[in-house]
Amino acid sequence: MKRLITTIKNIWAIEDLRKRILYTLSLVLVYRIGSYVVLPGVDPSQLSGLQSQTQEGIMGLLNMFSGGAFANASIFALGIMPYITASIVVQLLVMVVPYFQKKQREGESGRRQMTQITRYLTILVTILQAPAYITNMMSQLGASTTAIYPFDGSDPSVFFWISSILILTSGTLFVMWLGERITDKGIGNGISLLIMVGIIARLPFALVGEFGSRMEEGGGLIMFLVEIVIWLVVILLCILLVQGTRKIPVQYAKRVIGNKQYGGVRQYIPLKVNAAGVMPIIFAQAIMFIPITLLGFSDSQSGSGFLAVFSDFNGFWYNFVFAILIIAFTFFYTAIAINPNQMADDMKKNGGFIPGVKPGKKTAEYLENILSKITLPGSIFLAIVAILPAFVSLLGVNSQFAQFYGGTSLLIMVGVILDTLQQIESHLLMRHYDGLTKTGRIKGRSSLPA
């Protein structure tokens, strides 16, 4: 406890770090206040139907990522997810389109152009998603009630549609701007931090709900404490997954230039066990919701049976297919994100080689073999983490609290917190203060789509 107080004092003593933290907290506060500002023309007292819809399923995930703004019919209802969608699309375009590959290799100027393209694509995605959100909100509130403008009992006017679409689009762009400001002048990755804040905002309600259910249904305080301990163990395992690396030794040849000697040192290439981050889970979830959406319009018995199987998020076949897709996407995304041939060429150009391995093709084959060996256990562990909420739900855990036992939400929380702590520790060490941890070291986080 004494060391914690000393660390907090050291953080507060650094003026630049203090300003960055306060700036970040102020923008996060603005984001949280905005998530409770309801769209003009919507009666907040009539949102019970929309809130009950967002208890589980895809709506529950969207509501969690938006910090409850989705269920509140807020001006930030769409949150930062359109920007994440646009970022994923741009990443995929970089992998397959030569024009975007060229822009990525142009350095800082190319990065700025890619960022601008992502912003324009975010506007397009938001304009497409806003009418869908309004339609769903109207179906839950009732389009002919006084819950929606105008208040004369008639159908919502064109003005309501246009104004709501503009407000939702502006809200998403404002949230995107907040994230970029946090990244530039605050601490941590702004976009990822806002997603994490939205997830953590639902945690107190989930804990209270689980505590109440345990007190009413049975188990009592002891069972609740056991669930908390298991949850902490799962978090520790996720930290191991996020920070797990395989170090490949690289030896650089000695070079004598003038009176100085360069090279001749051994360095390491850290290959992450989970190089794909949370992207496989995001892709797999998108694939799993496609058949549910399409077969929802079918009235046939076969379609209804298939729909019943894949609508049960706690069912065996849903989670089995979900896990297989995650494993497949982990290999796919890792193969695209990490290019062993390019790594071998860069090593050869810089006079580096892996001890015992010939430079060039043999080095590329060696790296590819190592990637395959570490990606398989990493993908299986990632699949287990993703389907863990279904297992704990079957054991009687509240559905809201079960979402924090794994999946995208827990991995994002762990990754963003580690990244933020790493930046704070770098500020402390740069000014000759002790780091956040006396033993061990914070080693970064998994990559996020943002």
Image (cartoon, rainbow, N blue to C red):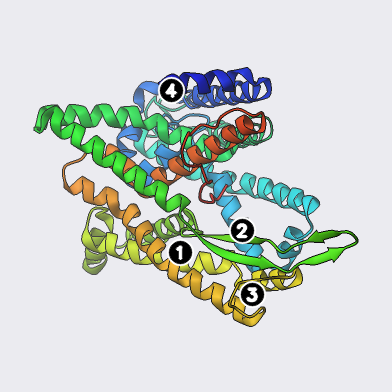
The residue that mark 3 highlights is: 341
Mark found first going from the N terminus, 1 or 2: 2
* Mark 1 vs mark 2: in front: 1
Q: CA distance from mark 4 to mark 3?
A: 67 Å
User: Which amino acid type is marked by label 2?
Assistant: Gln
Whether 389 is drawn above or below 65: the answer is: below
- The answer to whether residue 314 is visible is yes
Q: Residue at x 52, y 35 (%)?
A: 421
Say which element carries label 4: loop
* Mark 1 vs mark 3: in front: 3
User: Which amino acid type is marked by label 1?
Assistant: Thr
Q: Residue 42 in the image: x percent, y percent?
A: 45, 26
The residue lying toward the viewer, choosing from 123 and 149, is: 123
Q: Write down the quadrant of residue 253 in the picture.
A: bottom right
Say if mark 3 contacts mark 2, CB within 8 Å: no
Judge from the rendering whether residue 236 lies leftward or rightward of residue 99; answer left or right. Answer: left
- Quarter occupied by the N terminus: top left
Say which element carries label 3: helix
The residue lying toward the viewer, choosing from 340 and 7, is: 7
Label ID, residue 330: 1
Judge from the rendering whether residue 334 lies leftward or rightward of residue 237; answer left or right. Answer: right
Judge from the rendering whether residue 349 lies leftward or rightward of residue 283; answer left or right. Answer: right
The residue that mark 2 highlights is: 91
Mark found first going from the N terminus, 1 or 4: 4
The residue lying toward the viewer, choosing from 111 and 439, is: 439
Q: Write down the quadrant of residue 148 in the picture.
A: top left
* Mark 3 vs mark 2: in front: 3
Say which element carries label 1: helix
The residue that mark 4 highlights is: 152
Q: Residue at x 54, y 69 (%)?
A: 335
Local crowd at mark 2 within 10 Å, few (<14), some, or many (≥20)?
some
Mark found first going from the N terminus, 3 or 2: 2
